[in-house]
């Protein structure tokens, strides 16, 4: 098939997944707005939309894997598309988290008169940064080191070792998420507790959400590595997961220093 | 007709910008900290009282006084 075309690009076959993704996104957004306002059926539409979106992601990426790993359409020049695309996606995520950290700094560096001109505001219970937050700030870079180990193993052709390294990476990531969830459960303040709660939980919450997405991506890579999809020359999916993971890892440092540590003093 | 002396709070280099809300708030806090340290009748605290009364809107002072009475004043008294 690819031998009969006289160029090294990939002209994709028609696919229903873009439109189904759009419909899923439409249902999610409309359902979400309905849910947050007094309309009937919002929750149902929101959940249906989310399920539909997740299904679309699954089948779309399954098709990409079929076209690349099984049908061989992803030549070097085709690989550039996902590579650059994913880097730009990470840049957009950086912008998003930058906005949340700006909001946090705006509120905490010059606290308003309405909350007493002090930070943290009076009565807000803060977490001790030297306990679980510090531990978690060590766990995440460790799992970043493990993903680098996995990458080196893939490049060296040591396939079994790469699977073990990915298992280590994902285990550390799950421990991180577990500790973070436990902390949220036992935290003395909530998201409704003044601007402190809003900025704290939005910034750490979205970071945590990105950690979970990154973990899922790494699990998929682990499964693919186990099934033998990744070769030492061609593993764009793995590289994307590793870049995403390093991004999540580095981002963790910012809330730790500015929100947990500085913000709690 | 005698000279009427008009005074307001002096310019404070800690608050150089046009928005003087923090200046008002800080003087209010300073007055109450002074009273807490030196007692209700201390004369040193009078100047802080004059400063905050010149700078702060009456509604703010009333609200803060009410918050202090109810124990919900958010500032570092």
Image (spheres, coloured by chain):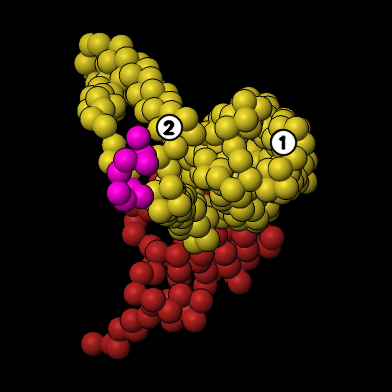
Chain colours: A yellow, B red
**Res. A226 image quadrant:** top right
Q: Is residue A125 above or below residue B40?
A: above
Q: Position of residue B47 (x, y in %)?
A: 52, 72
* Magenta range: A1-9
Pointer 2: what residue?
A: A71
**Residue in view at x 50 percent, y 66 percent:** B27
Which secondary structure, mark 1?
helix
Quadrant where the C terminus of chain B is found in the figure: bottom right
Name the one closer to the observer, B29 or B47: B29
User: Callout 2: residue from which chain?
Assistant: A
**Closer to us: mark 2 or mark 1?**
2
Q: Is residue A36 above or below residue B41?
A: above
Q: Position of residue A118 (x, y in %)?
A: 56, 55
Residue A69 can be seen, yes or no? yes
Name the one closer to the observer, A130 or A80: A80
Name the one closer to the observer, B76 or A137: A137
Pointer 1: what residue?
A: A159
Q: CA distance from mark 2 to mark 1?
A: 22 Å
**Residue in view at x 75 percent, y 40 percent:** A158
Q: How many marks?
A: 2
Question: Residue B25 in magenta?
Answer: no
Q: Residues within 10 Å of mark 2 (few under 14, many from 20)?
A: few
**Residue in view at x 45 percent, y 68 percent:** B23
Answer left or right for A158 relative to A24: right
Q: Residue furthest front?
A: A4
Q: Are marks 2 and 1 in contact (CB under 8 Å)?
A: no
Predominant SS of the magenta segment? loop
Q: Position of residue A154 (x, y in %)?
A: 68, 43
Q: Which mark is residue B71?
A: none
User: Callout 1: residue from which chain?
Assistant: A
């Amino acid at each position: 098939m690819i031998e009969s075309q006289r160029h090294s690009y990939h002209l994709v076959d028609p696919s229903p997944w873009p439109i189904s993704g759009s419909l899923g996104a439409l249902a999610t957004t409309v359902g979400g707005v309905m849910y947050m306002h007094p309309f009937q059926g919002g929750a149902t539409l929101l959940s249906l939309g989310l399920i539909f979106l997740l299904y679309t992601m699954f089948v779309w990426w399954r098709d990409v894997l079929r076209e690349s790993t099984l049908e061989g359409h992803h030549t070097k020049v085709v690989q550039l598309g996902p590579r650059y695309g994913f880097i730009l996606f990470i840049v957009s995520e950086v912008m998003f988290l930058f906005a949340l950290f700006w909001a946090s700094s705006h509120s905490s560096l010059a606290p308003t008169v309405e909350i007493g001109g002090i930070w943290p505001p009076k009565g807000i219970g803060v977490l001790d940064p030297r306990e679980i937050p510090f531990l978690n700030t060590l766990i995440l870079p460790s799992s970043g080191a493990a993903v680098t180990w996995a990458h080196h193993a893939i490049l060296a052709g040591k396939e079994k070792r790469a699977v073990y390294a990915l298992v280590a990476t994902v285990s550390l990531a799950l421990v991180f998420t577990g500790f973070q969830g436990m902390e949220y459960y036992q935290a003395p303040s909530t998201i409704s507790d003044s601007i402190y709660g809003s900025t704290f939980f939005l910034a750490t919450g979205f970071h945590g959400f990105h950690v979970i997405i990154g973990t899922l991506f790494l699990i998929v890579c682990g499964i693919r590595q186990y099934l033998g999809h990744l070769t030492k020359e061609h593993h764009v999916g793995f590289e994307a997961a590793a870049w995403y993971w390093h991004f999540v890892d580095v981002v963790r440092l910012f809330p730790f220093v500015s929100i947990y540590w500085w913000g709690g003093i | 007709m005698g000279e009427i002396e008009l005074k307001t709070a002096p310019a404070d280099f800690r608050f150089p910008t046009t928005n003087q809300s923090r200046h008002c708030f800080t003087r209010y806090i300073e007055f109450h900290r002074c009273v807490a340290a030196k007692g209700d009748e201390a004369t040193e605290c009078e100047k802080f009282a004059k400063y905050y009364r010149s700078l702060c809107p009456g509604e703010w002072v009333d609200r803060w006084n009410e918050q202090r009475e109810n124990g919900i004043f958010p500032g570092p008294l």
